[in-house]
Protein backbone atom coordinates (compact mmCIF):
# COMPACT_ATOMS: atom_id res chain seq x y z
CA UNK A 1 0.00 0.00 0.00
CA UNK A 2 1.34 3.40 -0.98
CA UNK A 3 1.91 6.22 1.51
CA UNK A 4 -1.02 8.26 0.19
CA UNK A 5 -3.39 5.30 0.54
CA UNK A 6 -2.13 4.63 4.07
CA UNK A 7 -2.65 8.26 5.08
CA UNK A 8 -6.15 8.29 3.58
CA UNK A 9 -7.02 5.03 5.30
CA UNK A 10 -5.82 6.33 8.67
CA UNK A 11 -7.73 9.60 8.22
CA UNK A 12 -10.91 7.76 7.28
CA UNK A 13 -10.63 5.42 10.28
CA UNK A 14 -10.01 8.39 12.59
CA UNK A 15 -12.96 10.21 11.04
CA UNK A 16 -15.31 7.24 11.44
CA UNK A 17 -14.35 6.78 15.10
CA UNK A 18 -14.52 10.52 15.72
CA UNK A 19 -17.88 10.95 13.98
CA UNK A 20 -19.32 7.98 15.89
CA UNK A 21 -18.24 9.28 19.30
CA UNK A 22 -19.03 12.91 18.57
CA UNK A 23 -22.35 11.90 17.01
CA UNK A 24 -23.46 10.21 20.23
CA UNK A 25 -22.34 13.15 22.37
CA UNK A 26 -23.82 15.70 19.97
CA UNK A 27 -27.13 13.82 19.84
CA UNK A 28 -27.42 13.94 23.62
CA UNK A 29 -26.42 17.61 23.74
CA UNK A 30 -28.93 18.60 21.04
CA UNK A 31 -31.69 16.57 22.69
CA UNK A 32 -31.02 18.29 26.02
CA UNK A 33 -30.94 21.64 24.25
CA UNK A 34 -34.31 20.94 22.63
CA UNK A 35 -35.73 19.86 25.99
CA UNK A 36 -34.45 23.04 27.64
CA UNK A 37 -35.99 25.19 24.92
CA UNK A 38 -39.37 23.48 25.32
CA UNK A 39 -39.09 23.71 29.11
CA UNK A 40 -38.39 27.45 28.89
CA UNK A 41 -41.38 27.95 26.61
CA UNK A 42 -43.59 25.88 28.92
CA UNK A 43 -42.56 27.85 31.99
CA UNK A 44 -43.41 31.10 30.21
CA UNK A 45 -46.82 29.66 29.29
CA UNK A 46 -47.36 28.67 32.91
CA UNK A 47 -46.58 32.23 34.00
CA UNK A 48 -49.12 33.49 31.47
CA UNK A 49 -51.64 30.94 32.75
CA UNK A 50 -51.09 32.13 36.32
CA UNK A 51 -51.60 35.72 35.20
CA UNK A 52 -54.92 34.74 33.60
CA UNK A 53 -55.81 32.84 36.76
CA UNK A 54 -55.08 35.84 38.97
CA UNK A 55 -56.97 38.23 36.69
CA UNK A 56 -60.02 35.98 36.67
CA UNK A 57 -59.85 35.53 40.42
CA UNK A 58 -59.38 39.25 41.19
CA UNK A 59 -61.40 40.97 38.48
CA UNK A 60 -63.88 38.58 36.90
CA UNK A 61 -64.97 36.33 39.77
CA UNK A 62 -66.16 39.17 42.06
CA UNK A 63 -68.52 40.31 39.28
CA UNK A 64 -69.98 36.86 38.71
CA UNK A 65 -70.12 35.40 42.22
CA UNK A 66 -73.39 37.14 43.16
CA UNK A 67 -75.05 35.50 40.17
CA UNK A 68 -73.77 32.03 41.06
CA UNK A 69 -75.97 31.87 44.16
CA UNK A 70 -79.11 33.00 42.38
CA UNK A 71 -78.86 31.20 39.05
CA UNK A 72 -79.27 27.49 38.62
CA UNK A 73 -76.92 27.52 35.63
CA UNK A 74 -73.31 27.57 36.74
CA UNK A 75 -71.04 30.15 35.05
CA UNK A 76 -67.74 28.37 34.40
CA UNK A 77 -66.05 31.61 33.32
CA UNK A 78 -65.98 32.57 36.99
CA UNK A 79 -63.54 29.76 37.72
CA UNK A 80 -59.86 30.65 37.13
CA UNK A 81 -58.93 27.12 36.05
CA UNK A 82 -61.64 27.16 33.40
CA UNK A 83 -60.43 30.52 32.07
CA UNK A 84 -56.84 29.31 32.00
CA UNK A 85 -57.80 26.21 30.03
CA UNK A 86 -59.91 28.14 27.54
CA UNK A 87 -57.23 30.81 27.01
CA UNK A 88 -54.61 28.11 26.52
CA UNK A 89 -56.78 26.37 23.92
CA UNK A 90 -56.98 29.67 22.02
CA UNK A 91 -53.24 30.07 22.40
CA UNK A 92 -52.70 26.62 20.87
CA UNK A 93 -54.05 27.90 17.58
CA UNK A 94 -50.60 29.38 17.07
CA UNK A 95 -48.73 26.83 14.98
CA UNK A 96 -45.65 27.02 17.20
CA UNK A 97 -47.63 25.86 20.25
CA UNK A 98 -50.33 23.67 18.70
CA UNK A 99 -48.83 20.50 20.16
CA UNK A 100 -48.66 21.84 23.73
CA UNK A 101 -51.31 20.45 26.10
CA UNK A 102 -52.07 22.14 29.42
CA UNK A 103 -53.60 20.52 32.51
CA UNK A 104 -54.22 21.58 36.09
CA UNK A 105 -53.71 18.10 37.52
CA UNK A 106 -55.51 18.24 40.88
CA UNK A 107 -55.98 15.54 43.49
CA UNK A 108 -59.51 16.65 44.40
CA UNK A 109 -60.89 18.86 41.60
CA UNK A 110 -64.39 20.23 41.14
CA UNK A 111 -64.35 19.30 37.46
CA UNK A 112 -63.21 15.71 37.04
CA UNK A 113 -61.56 16.75 33.80
CA UNK A 114 -58.78 18.12 36.01
CA UNK A 115 -58.43 14.89 38.01
CA UNK A 116 -54.79 13.79 38.24
CA UNK A 117 -54.12 10.29 36.93
CA UNK A 118 -51.87 7.85 38.79
CA UNK A 119 -48.69 9.21 37.23
CA UNK A 120 -49.65 12.82 37.89
CA UNK A 121 -50.73 11.96 41.43
CA UNK A 122 -47.18 10.79 42.20
CA UNK A 123 -45.82 14.10 40.91
CA UNK A 124 -48.25 16.05 43.09
CA UNK A 125 -47.33 13.94 46.13
CA UNK A 126 -43.65 14.65 45.49
CA UNK A 127 -44.42 18.39 45.43
CA UNK A 128 -46.37 18.05 48.67
CA UNK A 129 -43.47 16.26 50.35
CA UNK A 130 -40.99 18.87 49.06
CA UNK A 131 -42.94 22.15 48.67
CA UNK A 132 -39.88 24.13 47.57
CA UNK A 133 -38.72 21.70 44.91
CA UNK A 134 -37.94 22.93 41.40
CA UNK A 135 -40.24 22.24 38.42
CA UNK A 136 -39.91 18.71 37.08
CA UNK A 137 -39.52 17.59 33.49
CA UNK A 138 -39.13 14.13 32.02
CA UNK A 139 -40.80 11.65 29.68
CA UNK A 140 -43.88 9.49 30.12
CA UNK A 141 -46.03 7.35 27.83
CA UNK A 142 -49.72 8.14 27.32
CA UNK A 143 -51.84 5.80 25.18
CA UNK A 144 -48.70 4.37 23.62
CA UNK A 145 -47.26 7.79 22.71
CA UNK A 146 -44.16 9.14 24.41
CA UNK A 147 -44.73 12.58 25.91
CA UNK A 148 -42.36 15.13 27.39
CA UNK A 149 -43.86 16.87 30.40
CA UNK A 150 -43.04 19.96 32.45
CA UNK A 151 -44.68 20.19 35.88
CA UNK A 152 -44.68 22.74 38.68
CA UNK A 153 -46.59 22.77 41.95
CA UNK A 154 -50.01 24.41 42.15
CA UNK A 155 -50.70 26.12 45.48
CA UNK A 156 -53.80 27.91 46.81
CA UNK A 157 -52.51 31.39 47.55
CA UNK A 158 -55.70 33.49 47.62
CA UNK A 159 -58.53 33.30 50.14
CA UNK A 160 -61.12 33.93 47.45
CA UNK A 161 -60.27 30.54 45.89
CA UNK A 162 -61.75 28.84 48.93
CA UNK A 163 -65.18 30.32 48.25
CA UNK A 164 -65.83 27.44 45.86
CA UNK A 165 -63.56 24.84 47.45
CA UNK A 166 -63.89 25.12 51.23
CA UNK A 167 -67.14 23.32 52.11
CA UNK A 168 -70.27 22.42 50.10
CA UNK A 169 -72.28 24.71 52.37
CA UNK A 170 -70.20 27.75 51.40
CA UNK A 171 -70.02 26.91 47.69
CA UNK A 172 -72.37 28.61 45.18
CA UNK A 173 -75.64 26.79 44.68
CA UNK A 174 -75.23 26.63 40.93
CA UNK A 175 -71.84 24.94 41.42
CA UNK A 176 -73.41 22.30 43.64
CA UNK A 177 -76.18 21.81 41.08
CA UNK A 178 -73.66 21.36 38.27
CA UNK A 179 -70.87 19.36 39.91
CA UNK A 180 -72.38 17.96 43.12
CA UNK A 181 -70.99 17.84 46.67
CA UNK A 182 -68.72 14.81 46.35
CA UNK A 183 -65.49 16.41 45.19
CA UNK A 184 -63.64 19.69 44.94
CA UNK A 185 -63.87 20.64 48.62
CA UNK A 186 -61.57 20.69 51.62
CA UNK A 187 -58.91 22.82 49.97
CA UNK A 188 -56.64 24.77 52.28
CA UNK A 189 -54.88 28.09 51.92
CA UNK A 190 -51.15 27.91 51.04
CA UNK A 191 -51.39 24.16 50.52
CA UNK A 192 -50.32 22.37 47.36
CA UNK A 193 -53.43 20.85 45.79
CA UNK A 194 -52.11 19.84 42.40
CA UNK A 195 -49.61 20.52 39.64
CA UNK A 196 -49.57 22.60 36.50
CA UNK A 197 -48.46 20.28 33.73
CA UNK A 198 -47.73 20.92 30.07
CA UNK A 199 -47.29 17.98 27.71
CA UNK A 200 -45.44 18.02 24.41
CA UNK A 201 -45.12 14.98 22.10
CA UNK A 202 -41.60 13.61 22.42
CA UNK A 203 -41.49 13.21 18.65
CA UNK A 204 -41.52 17.01 18.30
CA UNK A 205 -38.48 17.39 20.54
CA UNK A 206 -36.61 14.45 19.04
CA UNK A 207 -37.34 15.53 15.46
CA UNK A 208 -35.94 19.01 16.17
CA UNK A 209 -32.85 17.45 17.73
CA UNK A 210 -32.49 15.04 14.79
CA UNK A 211 -32.71 17.84 12.23
CA UNK A 212 -30.01 19.76 14.07
CA UNK A 213 -27.93 16.58 14.34
CA UNK A 214 -28.18 15.85 10.61
CA UNK A 215 -27.23 19.45 9.83
CA UNK A 216 -24.21 19.33 12.15
CA UNK A 217 -23.08 15.95 10.83
CA UNK A 218 -23.41 17.26 7.29
CA UNK A 219 -21.21 20.24 8.14
CA UNK A 220 -18.67 17.95 9.82
CA UNK A 221 -18.70 15.66 6.78
CA UNK A 222 -18.04 18.58 4.42
CA UNK A 223 -15.23 19.85 6.64
CA UNK A 224 -13.63 16.39 6.72
CA UNK A 225 -13.88 16.06 2.94
CA UNK A 226 -12.17 19.44 2.49
CA UNK A 227 -9.47 18.44 5.01
CA UNK A 228 -8.92 15.14 3.21
CA UNK A 229 -8.52 16.89 -0.15
CA UNK A 230 -6.16 19.52 1.28
CA UNK A 231 -4.04 16.90 3.09
CA UNK A 232 -3.79 14.82 -0.06
CA UNK A 233 -2.71 17.82 -2.13
CA UNK A 234 -0.13 18.91 0.45
CA UNK A 235 1.14 15.35 0.82
CA UNK A 236 1.42 14.92 -2.91
CA UNK A 237 3.13 18.28 -3.53
CA UNK A 238 5.46 18.50 -0.53
CA UNK A 239 6.39 14.83 -0.09
CA UNK A 240 5.32 12.27 -2.66
CA UNK A 241 6.34 14.05 -5.88
CA UNK A 242 9.70 15.08 -4.41
CA UNK A 243 10.42 11.57 -3.17
CA UNK A 244 9.48 10.21 -6.59
CA UNK A 245 12.00 12.58 -8.23
CA UNK A 246 14.68 11.52 -5.76
CA UNK A 247 13.91 7.86 -6.52
CA UNK A 248 14.20 8.47 -10.29
CA UNK A 249 17.61 10.20 -9.89
CA UNK A 250 18.83 7.44 -7.57
CA UNK A 251 17.77 4.83 -10.13
CA UNK A 252 19.69 6.64 -12.90
CA UNK A 253 22.78 6.82 -10.69
CA UNK A 254 22.45 3.12 -9.86
CA UNK A 255 22.82 2.23 -13.57
CA UNK A 256 25.94 4.40 -13.95
CA UNK A 257 24.47 7.75 -15.10
CA UNK A 258 26.61 10.12 -13.02
CA UNK A 259 25.26 13.17 -14.83
CA UNK A 260 21.90 12.79 -13.12
CA UNK A 261 21.59 15.46 -10.43
CA UNK A 262 19.12 16.20 -7.65
CA UNK A 263 17.39 19.52 -7.93
CA UNK A 264 17.83 22.12 -5.24
CA UNK A 265 15.77 21.05 -2.30
CA UNK A 266 13.98 22.87 0.51
CA UNK A 267 15.40 22.81 4.01
CA UNK A 268 13.15 20.06 5.32
CA UNK A 269 13.31 16.30 5.88
CA UNK A 270 12.87 15.49 2.18
CA UNK A 271 15.59 18.07 1.35
CA UNK A 272 17.90 16.39 3.86
CA UNK A 273 17.24 13.07 2.15
CA UNK A 274 18.13 14.56 -1.25
CA UNK A 275 21.35 16.06 0.16
CA UNK A 276 22.25 12.67 1.62
CA UNK A 277 21.76 11.08 -1.82
CA UNK A 278 23.91 13.84 -3.38
CA UNK A 279 26.74 13.10 -0.95
CA UNK A 280 26.39 9.40 -1.61
CA UNK A 281 26.49 10.08 -5.35
CA UNK A 282 29.68 12.16 -5.01
CA UNK A 283 31.26 9.48 -2.83
CA UNK A 284 30.33 6.81 -5.33
CA UNK A 285 31.68 8.91 -8.21
CA UNK A 286 35.01 9.46 -6.38
CA UNK A 287 35.26 5.76 -5.61
CA UNK A 288 34.70 4.85 -9.28
CA UNK A 289 37.28 7.40 -10.43
CA UNK A 290 39.86 6.03 -7.93
CA UNK A 291 39.10 2.50 -9.06
CA UNK A 292 39.61 3.44 -12.71
CA UNK A 293 42.97 5.16 -11.90
CA UNK A 294 44.18 2.04 -10.07
CA UNK A 295 43.30 -0.06 -13.06
CA UNK A 296 45.29 2.22 -15.35
Image (cartoon, grey):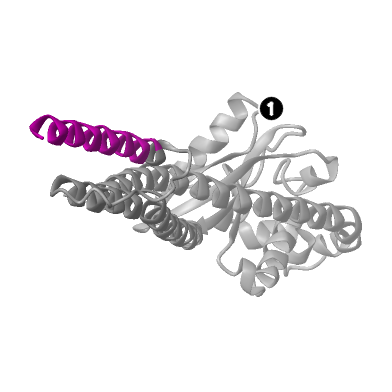
Q: Between residue 11 and residue 272, name the one nearer to us.
A: 272
For the magenta stretch, what is the residue range? 272-296
- Packing grade of label 1 (10 A; few <14, some 14-19, many >=20) is few
Query: Is any atom of residue 202 visible in this view?
Result: no
Q: How many labels does the image show?
A: 1
Q: Mark 1 highlights which residue?
A: 132
Magenta span includes 275: yes
Residue 237: x and y, percent? Answer: 40, 56
Residue 246: x and y, percent? Answer: 29, 48
Q: Is residue 95 above or below residue 223?
A: below
Residue 131: x and y, percent? Answer: 67, 27
Magenta span includes 166: no
Residue drawn at x 74%, y 45% as measured from the top left: 169
Residue drawn at x 55%, y 49% as measured from the top left: 35
Q: Is residue 289 above or below residue 19?
A: above
Q: Between residue 150 and residue 50, name the one nearer to us.
A: 150
Q: Between residue 22 and residue 75, name the one nearer to us.
A: 22
Q: Between residue 124 and residue 135, name the one nearer to us.
A: 135
Residue 31 as seen in the image, left or right of residue 156: left
Q: Is mark 1 on a helix, strand or loop?
A: loop
Query: Is any atom of residue 140 visible in this view?
Result: yes
| Quadrant the C terminus occupies | top left
Q: In which quadrant of the rendered view does residue 112 lie?
A: bottom right
Residue 112 as seen in the image, left or right of residue 257: right
Residue at the extreme front: 296
Q: Is the magenta stretch mostly helix, strand or loop?
A: helix
Residue 264 as seen in the image, left or right of residue 65: left
Amino acid sequence: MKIQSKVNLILIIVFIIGIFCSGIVLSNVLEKKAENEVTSQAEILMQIANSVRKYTNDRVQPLLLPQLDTKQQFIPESIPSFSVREVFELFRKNKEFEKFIYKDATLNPTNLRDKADDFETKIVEQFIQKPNSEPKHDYRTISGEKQFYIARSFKIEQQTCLHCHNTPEEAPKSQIATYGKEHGFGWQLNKIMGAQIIYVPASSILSNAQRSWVLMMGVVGIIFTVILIVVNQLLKKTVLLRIKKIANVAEQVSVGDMNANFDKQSKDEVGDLAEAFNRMKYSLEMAINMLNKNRE
